[in-house]
Amino acid sequence: MGPIGPISKVLVANRGEIALRVLRTCREMGLHTVAVFSDADRGALHVRAAYQAVRLGPAPVAESYLRGDLVIEAALASGADAIHPGFGFLSENAAFVRAVRDAGLRFIGPSPEAIEAMGDKIQARRRMLEAGVPVVPGTADPVAPDDQATLLSEAESIGFPVMIKASAGGGGKGIRIVREAGELLNAAARASSEAAASFGDGRIYLEKYLEEPRHIEIQVFGDSHGNVVHLGERECSIQRRHQKVVEERPSPLLDEDLRARMGAAAVAAAQAIGYENAGTLEFLVDKHRDFYMLEMNTRLQVEHPITEATSGLDLVRWQLLVAAGEPLPLTQDQIRHDGHAIECRLYAEDADHGFLPAVGKVERLELPGGPGVRVDTGLYDGMEVTPHYDPMLAKVIVHAADRPQALARMDRALSELTITGVVTNLPFLRRVVASEAFVSGRYDTSTIERDPEAFAPRIDDERARHLSAIAAVMAHVLRRRRGFAARGRSAGSVGAAAAGVTGSARAAASHEGGAASSRSWVDAFRPGGSGW
């Protein structure tokens, strides 16, 4: 295709799977590309995939990927005329966007004014109320974390339980749920401290905490010609500690009426701030099917591939076209969706032992394939997974004609995925996808934490039989090694040990949930920590 208007070379200011994702679309569109990297990422796939690559600095993000000045220097030195931020890092940093524009470069994303309008959640709440978009009841202004009287007064006015939230940032940080007055001061101090450490802004506010809500977001797109459309919803309610784990679209909850009303609200929100490029409005839907806007993410979302799967659209392509000044490729009436899509996030963490973060060297990697399967990842054999960056290693996306087929396809895809050398949450993902709550579509944001045993490791009858056989072989080997005479003297004790091991396996299999008592056996059957 070649250059699109003023854009001919794009620097991707990110790493890993999202950098690769953007680079691939740029290549398809005939655009030259520039990657940036830290010392830890010198051999990364995104570095190899770009036409050029520029070193930013040492591994820590504060010395590399968060150094906006170095990113702009790299763009100018390499001859790039546009910067794509991906998600995370500098993607929602209004000051960086201004610096990009001041340097004569194009930012592939929204304006700094739009980022500021929606990046501050308190300001965003005010703007949305003015636009007629429903928001969760809460405070209109920041609350000092040590102001006990105001905290208590506002919380009682809203009604317990309440949620203390950071005004800036996202990703589940700076959030605390408070169910009674005695918890307010401590929770406010912790939320403010976490927010200040994560975002450099310790301001907090209070919102009504909705019990067992659904978290549903709407993808929107705007252009410089005044057009705004929505591309439908994504269901993001399968979460752990406010972090998304599995997403799907369409949502099992929405009917056509609710879907249309939420889409219209999302478009109204984007129009209210003159929004351009890709953005996402996040909503909570309560048990009465009333919806409230949470926040707007002014960037491409991690889970955008499931929208691409059902719509057949390339959202990065749309971003590039809009950034070049072109109108949106389709009108609202022309947007169509087909089938069902699900995404699972693969993290470097041990879900069977408190979700502890994991590091290590990828020794063996086998990715799933076949009809309707897509894997977005920066993984490769021999890659070092370090503690410097986000633990998300890959996204497994499936698309099928309907939800039952999509569920079966995801189960198959996860069974084909193998990674050793680094512990991952793969076993946990398989349990989530197979769980009664997810299969039925009757779940909410607290499902995982409300019923952890439903997602804990289990040993089925077949594995129990395997363990029984192993125990018998172990006992036989011990008897032979000790000799005939010794075997005679110790037969009773060895037999008892074998029976005990066999009994333990059977007990673990028959134990309701089988989670706590069987954990050592589960670990024994997890090659590289991520087998079953």
Image: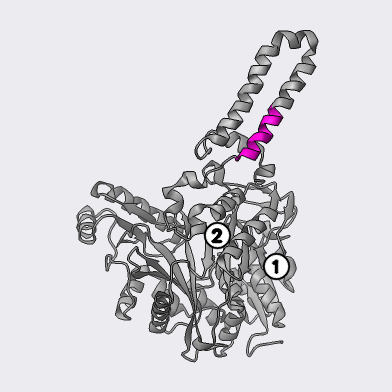
Asked if residue 78 shows in the view, the reply is no
Q: Percent position (x, y) of residue 262?
A: 40, 76
Residue in the image at 66% along x and 36% along y: 524
Q: Is residue 391 above or below residue 320?
A: above
Q: Which residue is mark 1?
A: 371
* Camera-nearest label, 2 or 1: 1
Q: Is residue 152 above or below residue 95?
A: above
Q: Image check: 498 left or right of 197?
A: right
Q: Image check: 466 left or right of 267?
A: right
Dominant secondary structure of the residues highlighted in magenta in the image: helix
Point out the stretch of residues depicted in magenta.
Answer: 460-471
Inspect the image, locate mark 2, and give the three-letter code of the amino acid beneath it: Ala
The answer to which image quadrant residue 526 occupies is top right
Q: Which residue is mark 2?
A: 62
Residue in the image at 70% along x and 11% along y: 490
Sooner in the amino-acid sequence: mark 2 or mark 1: 2
Asked if residue 285 shows in the view, the reply is yes
Q: Nearer the viewer, residue 202 or 244?
A: 244
Inspect the image, locate mark 1, and give the three-letter code of the amino acid beneath it: Pro
Q: Nearer the viewer, residue 303 or 165?
A: 303
Say which quadrant the N terminus sits in. bottom right
Q: Percent position (x, y) of residue 356?
A: 54, 45
Q: Is residue 151 above or below residue 122?
A: above
The answer to which image quadrant residue 27 occupies is bottom right
Q: Secondary structure at mark 2?
A: helix
